[in-house]
Structure formats: C-alpha cells, structure tokens
Amino acid sequence: MAGERQDRRRTVPSFGIALTGQALKSSPPKVLPRRQQLQLLKALAREAGWRQLSLQTLLSVVSSLLDIAGLGLAVSLLLSSGTDFATSPTWLRELPLSSSLVLLVGLILARGLIQARVAVSREWLRSGFTDRLRQQLLHEVFSASSRQLDQLGRGDLLALLMADITRSAMSLDQALLMVQALLAMLVYLISVLVVGRTAAWPLLLALAATASAALLKRSGSWGLGRIQSRLNAALQRTVGDGLHGLNALRAAAAEVWLLNRFARETAKGRWLLRERVRRRAGYNAWRDTLVVAIAGVWMLIQGEALTAEVLATTLVLAYRAGTSLSAVVQARRLCLGSLPGYEALRERRQQLRADPLLTFGTALSERSLQRLGLEHWSRLHWQSTDPGAAAPTSISLQPNRLVAITGASGCGKTKLLDRISGLHDEENSFWTIHGQNTTFQLNGLAAAQQLRGLMACAPQHAALFEASLRDNLLLGADLADQTIKEWLHRLGLEHLLDRQDGLDTPMSLAQTPFSGGEIHRLGLLRAWLRSRPVEVLDEPTAFLDATASQRVREVILERSRERLVLFSSHDRDLLKQADVVIELPSSELKV
C-alpha cells in the first residue's frame, strides 16, 4: 500500500488610552445633542420590545400608586385632628388615633410587601433583557466574518458583555423610573392643588428649589458615562491580557508592568466614581438647603397663622416635593450616565454587521446540508476571487488523498488552509462539492459557516475551555467513553484518565495544566472525533517528540484512506507520506 501511494504521489509546482484623572477633567468627551440622545434611547426601547416596555411600565404604575397611597394616608392622618384644615374622609376622622395608627402600620406593611414583589419582577425583566442582549452579541460575534472580527479587540467585547450591556438595560430601567417619578409628582401636585390649596405653596416652592439645585449643580452624566465605557474596555483588556498569557507574563518577568497598567486603569475608575459621588452629594446638599430655606421663609411670613398640624403637613409636603422631583433628576442622570453603554454596543454591532455588498452568496438548504453531510464526496474545489489574494487562488482536492502544503515560515500556509476551510476571506471564496450524484455550490459568509460544520479543522494552536476533558473533546456531541479512552491510549494521553473523575474532571485554566504537546494532540483528537469527510490539520506534528509524531503520522495516513486530509507541515517524514504536495514560495510573504 505504501508503494502504491508513493506511485500516485506528485509534486505541484510553486505558484507564482493613558489619561490621568486631571486630564479627564480638563478634556471631557464631546456631548451628543439632546435629540441624538433621545434617538438612542428610542432605539433601546424599540429593541426591548413592546412586551418588555408594557410590563415594566405596568410595574412602575403599580409602584407609583402604592407610593402615593401610602403618602396620602399619612397626610390624611396628620390632617384628621379635627381642625378646619382637615379634608380627609369622615370615616377616617372618626377613627381613634390608636386605630388610625394600626391601620397605617398595616397598610404600610402590605404596601412594602407588594413593592418588594414589584421590585423582584422588575429585576427579573431587566436581567432577562440583559441576557437577551448578551446572547445576541455573542451570536453576532460567532456569525461575523474574519475581516469584521479583525476590527474588534478582546477588551472591547469583554467590556460589552460584562458591563456595558448591563448599563444599557439599566438606562432603559432608569428612563422608566424617571417617567414613574414624574407621574407620581404630577399626581401628588394636582391632588394638593385640588384638596389643600394653602398647602400647595410650600410644595411649589420646594419644587422650584429642587429644580434650581439641579441647574446649579450639573452632573455631566453623559460625559462621565462615555468615560466609563472607555475605562471598562481598558480594564477588561488588561485583565484579559494577564489571564490569557499568564505563563508568558511570568516567563518575561513582566508582572510588575501589568500590575502598574492595572493600577493606572483602576485609578481612573476610582476618580470617575469619586467624581460621580461628589456631584451627586453636591446636588443633594444644594437641594436640601434650598428646600428648607424656602419653606422656612414661607413659614416666617405666615407667622402665627400656621397651626402645629399645618406646620407638620407643610414640612412633609415640602420634603416630599423635593424628593419627588429629586427622584426625577437622579433617574435622568443615571439614565444618561448608563446610555453610553448602549452607544458602545451599537457601535460594535455596526462593526460586526456585514456590508450589504458582501452578504451575497449561495448557501445550502437544510435538506441539502444534511444530505451533503452523509454523502461521500468525490471532489472539493475552492476558488478565491480576491484580486489581492496570494497564490494559489484555486485548488481541486479529491477524497482518499493526503494533500500537503509546505513552504518557508510565513509564506501563508495557515492562511491558505483557513481560506479553503472558510475561516478567512469568506466573502471572496467559492466552493464546489461533487457528491455521488449531485454537485453543490457554495459561496459567501453563510456558506462558509455551513462548510465549517462539514469539515473538521485542527488549528496549529488549539484552545482548551474551562470544562471537563469530555466536553473539550466532544463539544456537546455524544460518543461512547470506551472510544474516547481508546483514542487517548493511542495518542499516548492515557495518563489524563488518572485524574479523580477521569473524563469528567473539570479543567481550571488560570495556568495551563498541560504541556504544549498534550494540548496539540487534544486539538487533533477533537477534530478526529468529529469524523467529517474533510479534515484540515495545521502543523499536526508541531510541538511533538519523535514518538508522539510517529503516532500522529500513523493516524493521519490511516484516516486519509477514507477521507480527504489536507495539512500543512515542515515534517519531512509526514511530507513523504503525502499524495500531493503544494509548495508555497517564500516570495509570497508580505510584511
């Protein structure tokens, strides 16, 4: 058989942010016009959907009614002391004070329990919306082309998933809270104007004082929110770099460098938090001072005309008026401070959204896809239409062949494998698959995603996930334990079964628990267990000693008798086994 394979072998000729707190204060980010902020909030509401908005609005109305009812009852008790000022119902004025207090305590308790249930329901809705945004973003990342992913950084994506999407949902929630507080304030104001006109003056004056405090102590919420988005990305980038390359970091003795980088980012975060607290506290101080001053001046002017009940009611009304409008102001500030998180999400989505001019293509129907997955392939042809692509731009591959790609380091072997398997330059790739009786044609991004499901690829640098060994190898598929164990023994990895739970032992990957050779063989095994008609292996014997390399060569040769195996390598012994060798010239290397 070896001699027969050697006779068929032929050689294909060569083809022609580092800002300090002071800097942040001196150069705040550009603020969007209010109309654009409203458009951004409108887009967020539209994305949440009418059902989400309706339920949250209903809960807000219930919360407002409970709040107004509790306050109204307390004021009625204060006014029901038998004076002419009292406007509460007759049945309430006739109740003894002890009964009124018991009634008040009971109603306040009931209101508190209902409000707790409302709060839990609101949080459930908000977290559901947050999870939906995260799933959509992950789906868009997984569906994006390689060209689009090149525009994104790991820190940006982590910041969106961990922080900015949560801020987006919070922005919508705060907008509804602002409407709720405004509604409650208006209902309360109208009720006082209708029922107790004398008591309306301190309320109106308190509202004016609270509004004046908001104008005097501007929050700059939108600008601070945009700074927060940038800091989230920077911090996630630093943490991701440290954990992703922990061994490399230690090997370079660069722990101090990364810690200093982390310290600078967290210092910016502390400045931002301090600035927000300072502005919020300053606003509250101005609000309380102006409310008390204006209400006190009004009381002095009224003089002895005010009874004790009216004085108590006036203070309650003035305080409540201030806190009602303050709730509106604070909700608006939190909404604007969180809205830049949604702005960042929309910007990243725009980068992930394919260009309409590049979304054309020919994908397979579900029936054809299933049929192709079961059929024996007689030929696979790949072609690139990118005029700037390096040669070769067209390759035809036959089944039951071992096809090798070789050449100097950096000549483009990995990129060629990625283009053939739909991992790179998907928009410009065309594939023609000849089955037993049918020819299937695919091209474009959607077709590349389908093709990846029909192939088994083992990259040069395999990635492990924080899951069990079984999950790392099968990735959700189902296969008998005995089959997996036999493969591990064959590749010299049987010692991995000696751990406490064997295949089900979870992997903790803060540090790399395996050697480079072990990780590489696990990556190859992951591809082999998929059992696809085409296998693409990038440097399959890299990082391996002589014994492990020989085992891998034997497996590759055996599997090429039943399917097409395409690989890149510098391994002379493996290249000798190949039926076809494609040698890439080093002149194709581009800097």
Image (spheres, rainbow, N blue to C red):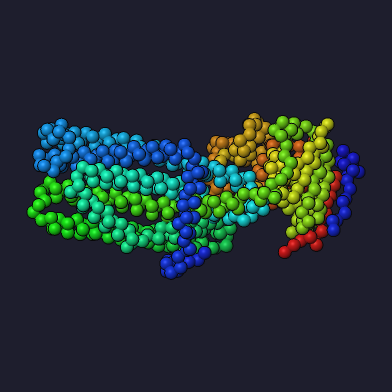
Could you tell whether 551 is left or right of 7 in the image?
left
Residues 81 and 8: in front is 81
Residue 1: give x, y in percent of width and height: 87, 38
Could you tell whether 449 is left or right of 469 in the image?
right
* Residue 533 in the image: above or below residue 286: above
Residue 398: give x, y in percent of width and height: 83, 41
Residue 170: give x, y in percent of width and height: 43, 47
Residue appearing at x 35%, y 44% in the figure: 180
* Residue 48 in the image: above or below residue 239: above
Q: Toward which corner of the image does residue 95 lie, by quadrant?
A: top left
Residue appearing at x 83%, y 51% in the figure: 582
Residues 525 and 190: in front is 190
Residue 206: give x, y in percent of width and height: 24, 54
* Residue 272 in the image: above or below residue 45: below
Residue appearing at x 40%, y 45% in the figure: 176
In this view of the protein, can residue 490 be seen by the observer? no
Q: Toward which corner of the image does residue 440 lie, by quadrant?
A: top right
In this view of the protein, can residue 66 be seen by the observer? yes
Outermost residue, left direction? Answer: 304
Could you tell whether 445 is left or right of 135 in the image?
right
